[in-house]
Image: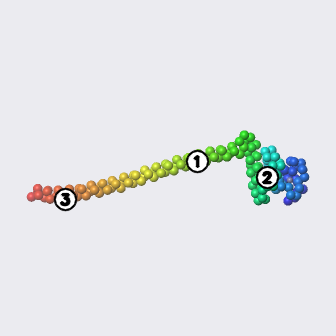
Amino acid sequence: MSHSTKCAACKSLRRRCCKDCVLAPYFPPTNPQRFSRVHKVFGASNITKMLEQLPLHLRAVAADCMSFEASSRVEDPVYGSVGIISQLQEQIIKAESELAKTKSEIAFHNAQQLQQQQNESSSCKIEELHDTDEATTNSTVKPVSSKNSK
Ligand SMILES: [Zn+2]
């Protein structure tokens, strides 16, 4: 990476951007607002300290996190990113209660359907019983009627 141009951090802090500048990979000169927001919320020395304490592969994610938190704080000075988090949590709670309601409705309809099926099958049994009753009465009636015809 060429350091003929200063990174956004060094440009803002009016210092020389050295070859191993910790901030340079995460605060390019093309996006000066990114550093100015993070600088306003965290302070330059804190950003440097936090990034230095992390292994190289985690630094980009940490810089993105700081940038996100700083932007949220600028947009919402009272709650910052917490405002967004609680908004999303509310959405989750709403969605969860809707899901529970829908699940209970499904269970209710399933139970209703099962009961309907049971009622239908038990009414079939009654009809069957009724048929056999008729058959037995017919058979008992027949000899009587034949006796009467004689
Ligand atoms: Zn720099």
Disc number for residue 139: 3
Residue 122 position within the rendered picture, expressed as x and y whole percent measured from the top left? 34, 54
Q: Are marks 1 and 3 in contact (CB under 8 Å)?
A: no
Q: Quadrant of residue 87?
A: top right
Q: Quadrant of residue 73?
A: top right
- Residue ID for mark 1: 95
Disc number for residue 22: none
Q: What amino acid is labelled 3 in the image?
A: Ser
- C-alpha separation, residue under disc 2 versus residue under disc 3: 99 Å
- C-alpha separation, residue under disc 1 versus residue under disc 2: 37 Å
Disc number for residue 50: 2
Crowd tier of the residue under label 1, counting other residues whose Cα lies within 10 Å: few below 14, some 14–19, many 20 or above = few
Viewed as shown, does residue 122 lie left or right of 20?
Answer: left
Q: Nearer the viewer, mark 1 or mark 3?
A: 1
Q: Residue at x 72, y 43 (%)?
A: 80
Element type at mark 3: helix
- Residue at the outermost left position: 150
Q: Residue at x 29, y 57 (%)?
A: 128
Viewed as shown, does residue 89 lie left or right of 60?
Answer: left
Is residue 19 visible to the viewer in this orientation of the structure?
yes
Labels in figure, total: 3
Viewed as shown, does residue 134 lie left or right of 46?
Answer: left
Q: What amino acid is labelled 1 in the image?
A: Ala
Residue 47 position within the rendered picture, expressed as x and y whole percent measured from the top left? 80, 50
Element type at mark 1: helix
Q: What amino acid is labelled 2 in the image?
A: Met
Mark 1 or mark 2: name the one nearer the start of the chain: 2
- Above or below, 46 relative to 136: above
- C-alpha separation, residue under disc 1 versus residue under disc 3: 66 Å
Residue 71 position within the rendered picture, expressed as x and y whole percent measured from the top left? 75, 46
